[in-house]
Image: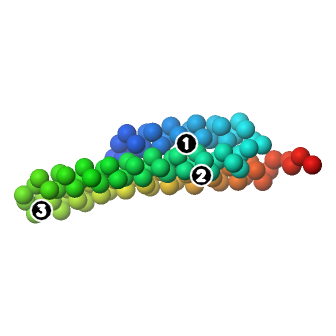
């Protein structure tokens, strides 16, 4: 849960999109190959937005800080926090795609 705490609200939005996407993908088995990539793209989009917004906030804070040591510390912590968005979103998107591929591969084909 620490990654979600570090990443902030966009990671929770990405988690929501992941859960909804996983549910829809499992429920609509015959369209899993079409739905999973769409939800994975939404998850990644939210992760990228969270990362970009977080990096801008870090930059604003660093610009206002006069001390070099404090700037370095803010950059380190802030970059770790913003990259958490990408780490979480990438993992969730990949898992969603793998589930979609597995369901598509295992579902019987209508002839």
Q: Is residue 33 left or right of residue 78?
A: right
Left or right of 66? Residue 30 is right
Where does label 2 land, which residue? Answer: 95
Mark 3 and mark 1 in contact? Answer it, CB < 8 Å.
no
Is 12 left, or right, of 24 in this rendering? left
The answer to whether residue 81 of the structure is visible from this angle is no
Query: Which residue lies at the image location 43% right of the left edge and 39% below the top edge?
Result: 12
**Residue 104 horizontal/vertical position (percent):** 76, 50
Which dot marks residue 69?
3
Choose the circle earlier in sequence order: 2 or 1. Answer: 1
Q: Secondary structure at mark 1?
A: helix
Task: Kindly report which numbered mark, 3 or 1, lies closer to the viewer in this rendering.
Answer: 1
Q: Determine which of the numbered discs, if any, sits on residue 18 in the image.
A: 1
The reply to whether the C-beta atoms of the residues labelled 2 and 1 are less than 8 Å apart is: yes
Counting labels gives 3
**Secondary-structure class at tag 3:** helix
Mark 3 vs mark 2, CA separation in Å: 39 Å
How far apart marks 2 and 1 lie (CA) works out to 9 Å
> Real-space Cα distance between discs 3 and 1?
38 Å
Give whichever of discs 3 and 2 has the lower sequence position: 3
Give the percent coordinates (x, y) of residue 83. Answer: 37, 56
* Crowding at mark 1 (Cα within 10 Å: few <14, some 14-19, many 20+): many
Answer above or below: position of 96 versus 69: above
Q: Is residue 98 above or below residue 14?
A: below
Relative horizontal placement of residue 92, taking residue 52 as reference (left or right): right
């Amino acid at each position: 849960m620490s990654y979600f705490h570090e990443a902030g609200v966009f990671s929770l939005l990405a988690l929501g999109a992941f859960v909804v996407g996983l549910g829809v993908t499992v429920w609509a088995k015959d369209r899993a190959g079409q739905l999973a990539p769409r939800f994975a793209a939404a998850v990644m989009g939210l992760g990228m937005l969270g990362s970009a917004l977080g990096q801008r906030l870090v930059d604003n804070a660093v610009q206002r800080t006069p001390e070099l040591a404090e700037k370095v510390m803010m950059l380190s912590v802030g970059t770790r926090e913003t990259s958490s968005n990408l780490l979480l979103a990438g993992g969730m998107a990949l898992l969603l795609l793998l589930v979609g591929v597995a369901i598509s591969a295992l579902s019987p084909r209508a002839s």
